[in-house]
């Protein structure tokens, strides 16, 4: 099972690496083509749509993932139920966004662009229905290929639209067109594996999806809201240019979190759902391991990006003078988000959606309060401070829900402190050398971090074994890499 999980995670991770790489390159190019003000509009509309997308999804995708992973024979019936209710929800959400934009003090151009971009909600809903079904069937290679094709087409269509003088309106039309093709590819893939709608629509199943999905939907809405509320507030209070700086920094930070956290836990979801049913205690131990490894992997990434923030900002967004300061602060929440994602996934597969709802509500409340305090004092950098505060609050809440006590809790705390000690050593070198020899400093600090992890015995044999399993599943060179870990697999 571990090998299959690792292969699935590797397939999605490799596809996501390509897709996110394409998207990152496109985001950089788009910033240069649009300028800070138009880029701020693009980022703000994207933030609104990302938050609103939780409403047509209504938590049903995760319910379908969980149930179809347990009972594959029910896939067609769940497909019928979701097709019957989710597209109408998307249309209703679109209309609600139009009404909201008319009620807020935005310019007509912004309102028209938002109305156009929101057409993608219905198209993406259809694509997501197929995506969730394919994930539940553990067709990770198929979903990965479609992901890469979809992103490639979206970028290609958007580039043609921009070069033709279509502006942001052309970009949104291109996005909608690529989304239609994504939905069609997912539908064709489902038909190939025999998953087709099975009539009639079962009202009892629809009611179950609403009953079990509403708390996930609200939690997801709150989750996206606390991630993106800063962009809307910055756009509203500080203007389009400041929103552009924040969007540029967010592109880098979100790429780190998605690549090293979201993709892995998406691949793990079907197996975690079965494990929750078979052995809840084993599931929690596994989640603790993945959360700890998220800290081990995420901490050096965060330190390195923070130390090189000014150079990264000048490299990718040379005309965005305010991005470096935002990035240096905003990146620090990424490691907390990666750890929190593990425990959020655990609550979902255990069916504890309401607990997750309260954690997300806490995050949104802290983010709103902190932004309202920090933005007038610190400007756009205050958004990074507020985001970090929100993730600290949520991580504390997740750990309280997990409720580790006794020897188990003390052992994890001891290992965590050792990783943090290794991170402090890395940070001292990275920040100390960044103005003199930044590249050499990054390499030396990373080597110091790895050496400190081994010397302090921060990872136990179970962690090394898990790393070996993941490495061994990588295509082409996985087995060779895994053999390098043999001498330290049981420190």
Image (cartoon, grey):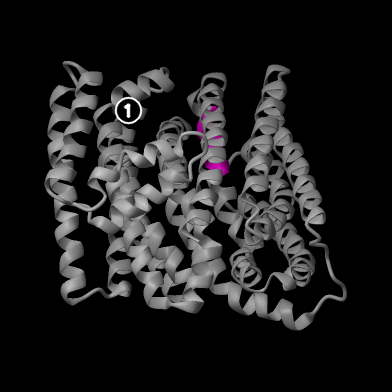
Report which quarter residue 460 is drawn in: bottom left
Q: Nearer the viewer, residue 170 or 252?
A: 252
Q: Residue at x 12, y 33 (%)?
A: 428
Residue 350 can be seen, yes or no = no
- Residue topped by disc 1: 324
Q: Residue at x 30, y 61 (%)?
A: 395
> Does 241 sit above or below residue 98?
above
Percent coordinates x, y for residue 221 in the rendering: 52, 61
> Does 51 sit above or below residue 70?
above
Report which quarter residue 64 is drawn in: bottom right
The secondary structure that most of the magenta stretch takes on is helix
Tell which residue pokes out farthest to the bottom in this image: 204
Residue 319 can be seen, yes or no = yes
Q: Residue at x 73, y 68 (%)?
A: 75
Q: Secondary structure at mark 1?
A: helix
Horizontal side, residue 82 vs residue 480: left or right: right
The magenta span reads: 38-46
Q: Nearer the viewer, residue 325 or 38?
A: 325
Percent coordinates x, y for residue 387 in the rendering: 34, 50
Q: Residue at x 46, y 40 (%)?
A: 235
């Amino acid at each position: 099972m571990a090998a299959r999980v690792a292969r699935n995670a590797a397939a999605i991770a490799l596809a996501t690496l390509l897709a996110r790489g394409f998207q990152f390159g496109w985001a950089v190019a788009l910033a240069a083509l649009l300028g800070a003000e138009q880029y701020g509009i693009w980022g703000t509309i994207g933030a609104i749509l990302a938050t609103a997308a939780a409403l047509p999804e209504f938590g049903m995708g995760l319910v379908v993932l969980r149930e179809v992973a347990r009972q594959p024979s029910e896939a067609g019936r769940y497909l019928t139920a979701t097709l019957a209710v989710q597209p109408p929800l998307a249309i209703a959400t679109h209309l609600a966004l139009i009404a909201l934009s008319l009620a807020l003090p935005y310019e007509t151009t912004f309102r028209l662009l938002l109305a156009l971009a929101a057409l993608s909600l219905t198209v993406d809903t259809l694509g997501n229905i197929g995506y969730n079904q394919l994930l539940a069937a553990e067709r990770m290679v198929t979903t990965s290929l479609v992901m890469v094709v979809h992103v490639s087409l979206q970028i290609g269509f958007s580039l043609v639209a921009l070069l033709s003088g279509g502006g942001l309106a052309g970009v949104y039309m291109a996005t909608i067109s690529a989304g239609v093709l994504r939905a069609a590819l997912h539908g064709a893939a489902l038909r190939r594996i025999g998953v087709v709608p099975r009539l009639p629509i079962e009202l009892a199943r629809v009611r179950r999806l609403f009953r079990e999905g509403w708390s996930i939907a609200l939690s997801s809405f709150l989750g996206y809201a606390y991630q993106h509320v800063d962009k809307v507030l910055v756009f509203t209070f500080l203007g389009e240019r400041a929103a552009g700086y924040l969007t540029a920094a967010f592109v880098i930070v979100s790429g780190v979190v998605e690549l090293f956290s979201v993709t892995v836990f998406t691949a793990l979801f079907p197996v975690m759902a079965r494990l929750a049913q078979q052995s809840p205690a084993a599931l929690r131990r596994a989640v603790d391991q993945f959360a700890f490894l998220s800290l081990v992997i995420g901490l050096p990434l965060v330190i390195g990006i923070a130390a090189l923030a000014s150079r990264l900002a000048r490299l990718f967004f040379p005309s965005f003078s305010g991005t470096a300061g935002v990035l240096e602060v905003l990146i620090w929440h990424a490691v907390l988000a990666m750890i929190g994602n593990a425990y959020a996934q655990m609550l979902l597969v255990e069916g504890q959606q309401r607990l997750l709802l309260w954690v997300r509500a806490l995050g949104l409340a802290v983010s709103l309060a902190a932004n309202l305090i920090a933005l007038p004092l610190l400007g756009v950098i205050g958004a990074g401070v507020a985001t970090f505060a929100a993730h600290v609050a949520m991580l504390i809440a997740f750990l309280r829900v997990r409720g580790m006590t006794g020897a188990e809790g003390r052992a994890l705390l001891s290992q965590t402190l050792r990783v943090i000690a290794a991170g402090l050593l890395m940070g001292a070198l990275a920040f100390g050398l960044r103005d003199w020899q930044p590249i050499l400093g990054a390499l030396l600090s990373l080597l110091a971090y790895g050496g400190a992890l081994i010397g302090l015995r921060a990872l136990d044999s179970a962690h090394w074994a898990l790393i070996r399993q993941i490495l061994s599943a990588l295509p082409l060179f996985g087995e060779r890499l895994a053999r390098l870990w043999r001498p330290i697999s049981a420190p």
